[in-house]
Amino acid sequence: MNSPRLIDADALIAALQRFADERDWQPFHTPRNLMLALTGEVGELAEIFQWLTDDEAARLADDPARYTHLQEEIADVLLYLVRLASVMQVDLNQAVADKLVKNAIKYPAPVAKAET
Amino acid sequence: MNSPRLIDADALIAALQRFADERDWQPFHTPRNLMLALTGEVGELAEIFQWLTDDEAARLADDPARYTHLQEEIADVLLYLVRLASVMQVDLNQAVADKLVKNAIKYPAPVAKAET
Amino acid sequence: MNSPRLIDADALIAALQRFADERDWQPFHTPRNLMLALTGEVGELAEIFQWLTDDEAARLADDPARYTHLQEEIADVLLYLVRLASVMQVDLNQAVADKLVKNAIKYPAPVAKAET
Amino acid sequence: MNSPRLIDADALIAALQRFADERDWQPFHTPRNLMLALTGEVGELAEIFQWLTDDEAARLADDPARYTHLQEEIADVLLYLVRLASVMQVDLNQAVADKLVKNAIKYPAPVAKAET
């Protein structure tokens, strides 16, 4: 029995590939270009939080316009990250599975906690 | 009939939640903290590409050690982005689906291309 | 009579140029490479603040080791930013002078405040 | 005899302090807020370079509108970096001077080069 995948972005990867193909954007989607575009989107995401208190950030969903903006910027970061992984042929599920194992070794759970 | 989801990160979201719970990390996983941690990981990803030519970047998989490092840094960015979306209760699949529709309107595919 | 310069980085610009020349680093100091290197350093600076409360961040100087680390990361960001401006032949003093004027128009000071 | 300062931003630091004071912005200029704002501006700077070839990036000055935009984004990054250093009471000149010494030890100049 296979364990379920932690993340499955296959349909998104295919959609982004088709989107780029239809617009002849492949020449622009080099790893370094995508890295810079990812940086740009992370900047836009950071701007949402820059002047907020922790309380205001946690209650962002109360403001529909800002919450929609948050959703869009999270999506933009995710789209470029998935596209970068795709052109570099990085398997996202394998990458996060390996990293979670590494993190679990680096930061062991307290025994009492782990036993409950 | 539902269309398949573009991205399904439910198992990853649950794993990250459990990982944080077991270590009592919830108080640290505020939106702004996660945003800064995401920025840190994006910086580490950018470092991989900073002195490479486009050709060297495209052939990074030829160097197993560096490719493993790339996989780890992509994973780290993804982990913090998914965790940020989770604490903000943003539905990643809905967010990217909405954004792809918006992008398709903003950047229409050339007619000839779209018809093929 | 000339107004004093807001910022004078001439000696630093020259030092960075000499440093790169002595190591034959000019071919690596392309604008896009420097932009990625700047992103990397901003990530390292963000890491310092990621798990701190506002109070802890404000009192960082109380911890000499961490404060030295902060100074180094601020320096790294500044070095790459000044180097990027240098290779793009952007006059930093003129750029910030123009931007302050623009900001003053965009965010006018309250009248009562401005009069005091 | 003192060596000249590598960078002198005293007038800029004072101008930014006055600008914030006149608008009662001090409560917003916490280290973490400024860090996020800096990230936002770095993202805007990265966007300028994201789809350019190295040649196009190097010739950006040929396009006055884009070059002005570049100057503004470099200024924005610098303004937030200087402001962050200011609220953290980091001496920029000392920080870069120390870092250049450290870099010179880490990356020694080739002897032949250093002797010329």
Image (cartoon, coloured by chain):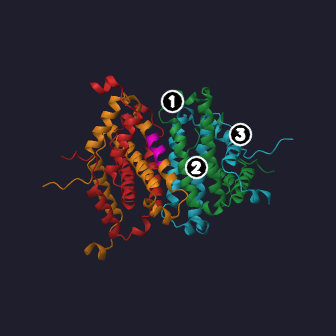
Chain colours: A red, B orange, C green, D cyan
Question: D65 or A100: nearer the eye?
Answer: A100
Mark 2 neighbour density, 10 Å: few (under 14) some (14–19) many (20 or more): many
- The residue where tag 2 is placed is D76
Magenta part of the chain? B35-42
Q: Position of residue D95 (x, y in %)?
A: 68, 40
Residue found 54% across the figure and 39% down from its top: D34
Task: Kindly check if marks 1 and 3 are in contact, taking CB atoms under 8 A apart as contact.
Answer: no
Label 1 resides on the chain identified as C
Q: Secondary structure at mark 2?
A: helix
Q: Amino acid under label 3?
A: Gln
- The residue where tag 1 is placed is C54
In the displayed image of the protein, which residue is found farthest to the top?
A: A112
Q: Position of residue D40 (x, y in %)?
A: 50, 47
Which of discs 1 and 2 lies nearer the camera? The answer is 1
Residue found 50% across the figure and 42% down from its top: D36
Residue found 65% across the figure and 33% down from its top: D89
Label 3 resides on the chain identified as D
Q: Secondary structure at mark 1?
A: helix
Position of D108 compared to C81: left or right?
A: right
Q: Position of residue A3 (x, y in %)?
A: 22, 45
Which of discs 1 and 3 lies nearer the camera? The answer is 3
Q: Dominant secondary structure of the magenta stretch?
A: helix
Question: B68 or C20: nearer the eye?
Answer: B68
- The residue where tag 3 is placed is D94
- CA gap between label 2 and label 3 equals 22 Å
Label 2 resides on the chain identified as D
Q: Is residue A95 visible?
A: yes
Task: Kindly check if marks 2 and 3 are in contact, taking CB atoms under 8 A apart as contact.
Answer: no
